[in-house]
Image (cartoon, rainbow, N blue to C red):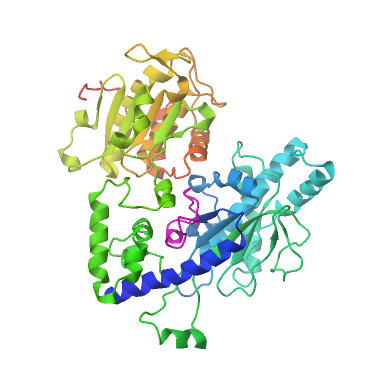
Amino acid sequence: MASDIYSRLHSIKEDIQFVLTVAKQYPHYPLFANQRCGAWYADPTRARPEFVYFKSTDGHYGIWDFNLRRANLHLLPIIQASKGMLLVDSTRRGKSIPDALSKTVPLWCAVINGAQTQRRNRSRIAITTGIPERETLYNEDAWEEYGKRVFIPPDVISESERAQMEERLPELASSFFSNMPDLQWPLRPLWITPQSSNIPSLNHSSSRLDQSTTPLANVQMDQSFYPVICISASKTGTTDMEQTRAEHLDYNYVQGSGDDHESWSMGLTPDLFWTYRDQLLTCEKEKLEDLVKQIVAIGATNDQHSSVPNPSPALDQARSHFVSPIKIVNGRISFASSNLSILPSAQRYAAIIQVCPCRGSPQSRTKIEICRGNETRLLITSMGAKRGQMDFLRVILPAVDKFASTWLSQDDRHHDQNGTSVEPESSLLVVDETGEYDEAIGIVVLLLGRFFTEEGKRLSIQETNNVSKESLRKRLEWVQQSIPRANPSRTTMKRVNEYAIPGKSKIRRQRPTIESAL
């Protein structure tokens, strides 16, 4: 094991150098790590902290899906502001580019381009960008081209598979977000690997490929676009030069070392690796296992959301416990994935829904313990598993509904128990102490569906919403725009649908009395 983890960490070190070399060529583009493997290769001093997840199976043959729970819409304003982005990931032996970068990202770009094109075709009005009319017309021509194409890496994906992916584009694009932000230019994936013969030079002012460089296959040199540069971090194969170099090293290079890290890392995570990187990479091979055990133990004794000793400023920023207001409702509901006790801003909120993990066996818990609270705070114990999901439907959602109605079915300005006027943008906070972004996100979706209109306006006491599966899906889109990591399970969303949609649930719902136990 010591030899394996030693080789993997030092292989990751090699790949990090390649990623940084590429990133230096594009200083204007933000760098993101594709979860989870990419996090090993993205230096926090260079990478952005936003959560990004392109799942490889979404692009697998015959599936070709755009998963609304992993929409990554929060990237679009960043891409537009920076005129492009970098995305790093890696894959194990046998491939040069991971499926997430070679299939899922191209499909994501194509669906967004297709959705943008459909919106333009429906409105017949060119997007207002403040640029000269000539450029606007050129822009519209670009959309027509990119709105129906899937760009794929050469010699990795077959033309037949690309054609089948393109057949699905109209269907996927038509079901896409109605409130997706407008883009000036379409998205275009590009790929760079350690085997690439050149790194494309991009004109940052227009995002056109510099024609003085060797063009990549399938790139329209006269088109304008936002490049989504996919960096596959690991080398493939073993050349004679690599074999000679390996004979002088005390480890064997492992392609895609960061992939499936649970099988080799002994509990070490990318977060801990970057915090203790120097110690880990300078440790002697025979002592590495003991050091890893010590680091993992330190991480386990800290709160799951707290900082480990002496983090870098960038890493500390990435772990910051910020509160995310739901933008479309002007912050009437906010969300935080953290421990309530370390949220200094929590006292600003008039009401708090706190979701905590179950710390005992589910069989030992009672219905009374699942939901307890007072007028301004509701404490929920997340049970998990099938029994927990039934409690989520029968107990938790009714309790949340009743509790929130006190605060969300009021005038725009109300007062707390001390008589202090409370602004609407700080009215209700949902705190997820489980770190799962699951049931707590389902609660936020329910609140948005029950108490806000399709335009994000608060319903009056006399008004009721006609809640449907489509309207709840739209509320989830709102949440994901403000909370990119929001990824509730299908089971959780099914329970929210059952509770919120009239006549859908076969279970008789009763609103329990919330016990005053805080």
Q: Nearer the viewer, residue 14 or 486?
A: 14
Viewer-proximal residue among 386 and 358: 358
> Is 222 placed left or right of 3 in the picture?
right
Q: Is residue 52 magenta?
A: yes
Q: Residue 333 location in percent, x, y?
A: 44, 28
Residue 313: % across, % down: 42, 50
Q: Residue furthest right?
A: 134
Measuring 77% from the left and 36% from the top, which residue is drawn there?
125
Residue 62 shows in this picture = no
Point out residue 216 in the picture as x, y percentages from the top left corner.
69, 68
Q: Position of residue 14 (x, y in %)?
A: 45, 72
Magenta: main secondary structure:
loop
Q: Residue at x 22, y 50 (%)?
A: 301
Q: Residue at x 30, y 22 (%)?
A: 511
Using the image, determine if residue 168 lies above or below residue 472.
Answer: below
Magenta range is 33-54
509 is higher (above) or lower (below) than 221 = above
Is any atom of residue 187 visible in this view?
yes
